[in-house]
């Protein structure tokens, strides 16, 4: 399955997917393109180093989300993409992409959804005082981190955790969970029944 990764920053989850592929753990996945909304995203450099098409589209150059996403679709069109993995892509996905890839966009989120959706999951987890957190891989729908859950991994929240220490503990799990979910997805082993994802 030909995939595009969308990332806004560092790209460590993108890197983990590429390592899993190199290790033979993603037999059905082909990483064809990396799309970023941020020109300075390290993920773009990771793509170029790995001979993966690196695409930067700035939302600032478009009047609406629809126009921005239409430009992304136009650039992806010749690459015949069949699915999208959001990996630290810090924007809401709109109707244009959702309609083009129904139940074919995955996201990884650094909390146990439906708790702590949004852009500040670690801070919100600590502020709330939760004792367990983790990561969630889910299909993307029109809401903020609301789509059907594919898999989750948990980690303890420690009394002396900072946002950074909690994020680092969760990230280790993200780097295992995302390749595992992408493998299931690309081998067509996932079925969505209502809110439930059945393997
Ligand atoms: C990851 O922790 C990912 O779960 C999170 O951004 C980080 C990106 O790191 N995503 C979100 O918070 C989405 N709401 P990376 O660029 O090193 O993969």
Image: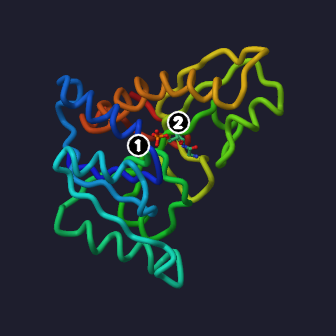
Q: Residue at x 18, y 29 (%)?
A: 22
- In the picture provided, is 9 more to the left or to the right than 35? right
Residue 18: x and y in percent read: 26, 35
Residue 40: x and y in percent read: 43, 58
The quarter in which the N terminus is drawn is top left
The numbered dot on residue 67 is none
Image colouring? rainbow
Query: What is the spatial separation of the Cα atoms under label 2 and label 1, in whole angstroms?
Result: 22 Å
- In the foreground, 32 or 47: 47
Q: Residue at x 48, y 22 (%)?
A: 172
Residue 86: x and y in percent read: 43, 48
Q: Which residue is mark 2?
A: 149
Residue 115: x and y in percent read: 71, 35
Q: Element under label 1? A: loop
Residue 102: image quadrant is: bottom left
The quarter in which the C terminus is drawn is top left
- In the foreground, 29 or 44: 44
Q: Which residue is mark 1?
A: 11
Q: Residue at x 53, y 22 (%)?
A: 153
How dense is the environment of label 1, judged by Cα within 10 Å: few (below 14), some, or many (20 and up)? many
Q: Nearer the viewer, mark 2 or mark 1?
A: 1
Q: Element under label 2? A: strand
Q: Residue at x 28, y 75 (%)?
A: 74
- In the picture provided, is 164 more to the left or to the right than 61? right
């Amino acid at each position: 399955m030909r995939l595009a990764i969308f990332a806004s920053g560092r790209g460590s989850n993108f890197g983990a997917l590429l390592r899993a592929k190199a290790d033979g753990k993603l037999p059905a996945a082909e990483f064809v393109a990396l799309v970023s909304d941020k020109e300075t995203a390290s993920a773009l450099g990771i793509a170029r180093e790995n001979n993966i098409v690196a695409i930067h589209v700035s939302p600032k150059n478009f009047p609406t989300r629809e126009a921005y996403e239409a430009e992304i679709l136009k650039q992806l069109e010749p690459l015949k993409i069949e699915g999208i993995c959001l990996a630290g892509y810090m924007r809401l996905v709109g109707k244009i992409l959702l309609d083009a890839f129904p139940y074919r966009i995955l996201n990884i989120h650094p909390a146990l959804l439906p708790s702590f959706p949004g852009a500040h999951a670690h801070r919100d987890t600590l502020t709330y005082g939760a004792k367990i957190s983790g990561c969630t891989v889910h299909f993307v729908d029109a809401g903020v981190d609301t789509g059907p859950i594919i898999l989750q991994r948990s980690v303890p929240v420690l009394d002396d955790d900072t946002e950074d220490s909690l994020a680092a503990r969760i990230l280790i799990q993200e780097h295992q969970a995302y390749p595992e979910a992408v493998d299931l997805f690309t081998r067509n082993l996932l079925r969505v029944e209502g809110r439930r994802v059945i393997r």
